[in-house]
Image: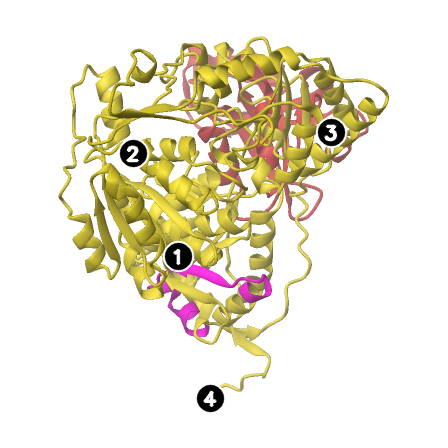
Chain colours: A red, B yellow
Amino acid sequence: MKHTVSILVENKPGVLMRVSSLFSRRGYNIHSLAVGTTEVPDVSRMTVVVDLPDKPLEHVTKQLHKLINVLKVIELEPTASVVRELMLIKVHAEPQTRSQVFDLVEVFRASIVDVTTDSVTAEVSGPPDKLAAFEDLVRSYGIIELVKTGRIALGKGERGIKDRQLRAAV
Amino acid sequence: MRRHILSKEITGAEALMRALEAQGVEHMFGIPGGAILPAYDPLLDSSIHHVLARHEQGAAHAADGYAQASGKVGVCMATSGPGATNLVTGLASSYMDSVPVVAVTGQVPRWLIGSDGFQETDATGITVPVTKHNWLVMDPGDIAQTIAEAFHVASTGRPGPVLVDIPKDVLQARFPYHEASPVDLPGYQPKTKPNVRQIKEAARLILESERPVIYAGGGIIAAGAGPALRQLAELTGIHVVTTLMARGSLPDDHPLCLGMPGMHGNYTAVTSMQRADLLIALGTRFDDRVTGKLPAFATQAKVIHADIDPAEIGKNRRADVPIVGDARLVIEELTSALQAEIAKGATGDYAAWTRQLDEWRSRFPYRFTQVDDGMLKPQFVISRISDITGGNGIYVAGVGQHQMWASQFIRFQRPRTWINSGGLGAMGFGVPASMGAKVAMPDDEVWCIDGDGCFQMTCQELAAMAVEKIPVKIGIMNNAHLGMVRQWQELFYTERYSQVEFGWDIPDYVKLAEAYGCVGLRCESVDEVDAVIEKARGVDDRPVVIDFRCDPRENCYPMVAAGTSNDDIILGPEFETDHVSHGDTLYSQDPPEEDS
C-alpha cells in the first residue's frame, strides 16, 4: 500500500542520504521523493511516497524518528491533503498533429514551455492521476522524454505539520 | 614574521583533547596515522590514557568491552581511510548491542575531500548504517560542541556508537577556543518516563495471568535495572529468562532465574516462553535467535513490551501493552503499581506454573559428559572456570560454540560481567573486548573464553596487552575447528565438512603467547584443568593464554535449528541415551535450591 509521508528535517549535509539509506536498509520501497526548503530557515521538508506491501507505516515512521536530524514525521491521508506533482513532457508534434497536442495542453490547463519544428514540451501540474491521464493521451504522438518532480503534499485545513500528530503513534 | 597568536587560540587537535577530557574520558583505544596525526601530539599532554591497539578493529572492540564492563562511554580513535574502515566491524557490533562508543577518525584535509585523496574514504557515509549518528566537522570551532553532542547521543536513550570525522587541517587550524554549550538537539528527545495508563494496564495483565514470564533483555543492564528487576521478580514470584545480552541481570543462583532462552538456551527458559500466557518483555527486541520461527513463538502469550526505543515495539511481535521508557523507570513504576494492587488484596496465582517450571528444570538441565580420562569437554573447562572464580569475574567471549557454552555454564552473579558480541556475532571480539574490560575494571578478574577461530582473528592485541601489562586470562577452547560451522555441517549438510578444520597445532598457541610476551599454557586432560586455571589466576603482570585442547566432536545443545519453532528444541544426545556409566562423571547444572 502506498503512503504519503511528510518529513521535516534539519537542513544539514548528508540528511537526504541518511533518510534514503534508512529506506533501502530496511527494505522500504520509495516510490517518489521530493525535497525542498520551507518557511523556516534551516528546515527542509521531504515528501516521500513509500510502498509497503506487508508492513504497517508505523515501522517506517518510528525508524525515521530515530534519525537525529529528523524533526517531525507525519502521514498525509489522501482525503485530508492536497497532493500535487509537476511534469515536463516532450512530445513529437509534427505540423499535422501539433494542434491536437495543443488542444490537450489546453484541456489539461497545462502550458507549452518549449517548441521546435517537430516537438512540443509541456508543463503539466496537478494530482498524480491527472499527469498519468495526460501521459496516456499523448503517448500515441510519441513521448520523447519526460521528468516528474515527485509528489509534494500539504494537509488540508488551517493547521501546519508542526501541530499535527501522527495517527497511531505509540 | 610569525603570526601573532592570541593566548586563547588553540589548535583543533587541542580542542579535541580538551573536549574529551571535559566528557570525563580517562582511557581510549586507537592507532595513529596520517590524518589523525595532529590529535596524537596534544594527547601527550593530556590526562587521557591511550592504549595503542595493533589493529583498529581491536580498538573498536576494546572500546565496546570497556563500555559494556563499566557503563561508561568507550572511546576509540583511528586515522582516515583504512583506519576508519577497520573500525566498522566494531561499530556494527556496538550498534547491534546498543553499546555507547564514540569513535574519532581523522579525515583528509578539507580541500582534498571528494578528490579520492590518499587514504580518503567517506567515513560518515560508510558508517551511517552502523552508528546512531555521525558528524563530519568542517570548522574547528565546532569540535567541542560536536564531541559534547556525540557523548550525549551515544550514552542517552537507547545507547549506541557514534562517529566524529575530523579533517586533518581542521585539527591543525588555530582558533579561539570556547567551551561547548549545553547540548540541544531538537530532533533527539528520548522518552524515558513510561505512560502511567500503560503501566496500570500491564499490572492488571500480570495479576490476571497464570503463566507469566519476564523476558529480560540487554536494556536491563544498559539501564542499571538489575536490582529493580530482582525486586519485581521477588514481589510477584514471576520467573525471569535472561537473554544473551542480559546474562547477569538477575544472578543465575537466584531461584527465579531460568537462564538463557533462544537458539542455544536451556529447555525451561525456551519452553516457559512457548507455554506462557503472558510475556513481560523488558528492554529486549524479540530477536530471531530468541523467538525462533516467529509465527510459532509463544502463540498463547499476551505481550507487555517495554523498551526505550519505540521502533522496537511491534517490530517483530505485536504488543498488547506497549510501553516506551527506560527499563529501570518502567520496572520501578510497574512495581509500585503492583504493590498498590497487592495492598488492595489483588494477587497473582502462579503456583501451578512454578511447579511446572521446577519440574522442567530438574528434568532438562544443561548436560554434558566428561569422561575422566577422555578428551576435555569445553563445557567442563568453562564450568571449572566459573566455579573456581565463583562467577565473580568478568567474562568475555568470542562468537560461536564457546560463546554459547560460556553463556550456559558460567554462573553469573551481577550485571556487566558478561561481555559478548550478541547481535552482530563478530568473531574476534573476545581478545580486544577483554582488553577493554580489564582497562575499565582493573580490580576485576577478566576471563576471555575464546575459540581457536576467533582468537586468530584478533590475537595481535596480545601485544598491546603485554606492553600495557593488562593481565587478562584467555582460555582458548581449542577444538581445532570452526566449531559452530562444523556442527551445522554435521547436522544440516550430511557431515560434509567444508573448510572448517584448523588443526590443533598451527599456530602453536603457547609459543605464540610467549612470542607476544604473554604466559602460554597448555591443558589436555581433566586432572590438569584446575591447576592451570589457578596458575593463570596467579599471573598479574601480563596476559595468560591457555590452550585447552578440547573435543572437536562436541556439539552445542540444546538447539533450535534456524527457521524452526522453539517447540522443536533439540535436547541433544545426552537426553537420548544414558551416558552415565562406570568411571564417567555426569555434570549437570542443577536447579537452584528454593531456600538458597
Q: Secondary structure at mark 4?
A: loop
On screen, residue A166 above or below B15: above
Inspect the image, locate mark 3, and give the three-letter code of the amino acid beneath it. Answer: Leu
Mark 2 neighbour class, 10 Å CA radius: few under 14, some 14 to 19, many 20 or more: many
Quadrant in which the C terminus of chain B appears: top right
Closer to viewer: mark 3 or mark 2? 2
Between discs 2 and 1, the one toward the N terminus: 1
Q: Which mark is residue B334?
A: 3
Mark 3–mark 1 CB contact (< 8 Å): no
Q: Nearer the viewer, residue B293 or A154?
A: B293
Which residue is located at x 16 percent, y 26 percent? B498
Q: Report the chain holding disc 3.
A: B
| Inter-mark Cα distance, 2 to 1 | 51 Å
> Do tags 2 and 1 sit on the same chain?
yes
Q: Nearer the viewer, residue B581 or B421?
A: B581
Q: Nearer the viewer, residue B403 or A117?
A: B403
Residue stretch rendered in magenta on the structure: B20-42
Q: Secondary structure at mark 3?
A: helix
Mark 4–mark 3 CB contact (< 8 Å): no
Q: Report the chain holding disc 1.
A: B
Mark 4 neighbour class, 10 Å CA radius: few under 14, some 14 to 19, many 20 or more: few
Which residue is located at x 56 percent, y 78 percent? B9
| Inter-mark Cα distance, 3 to 2 | 41 Å
| Inter-mark Cα distance, 4 to 1 | 29 Å
| Inter-mark Cα distance, 4 to 2 | 67 Å
Quadrant in which the N terminus of chain B appears: bottom left
Which residue is located at x 32 percent, y 53 percent? B536
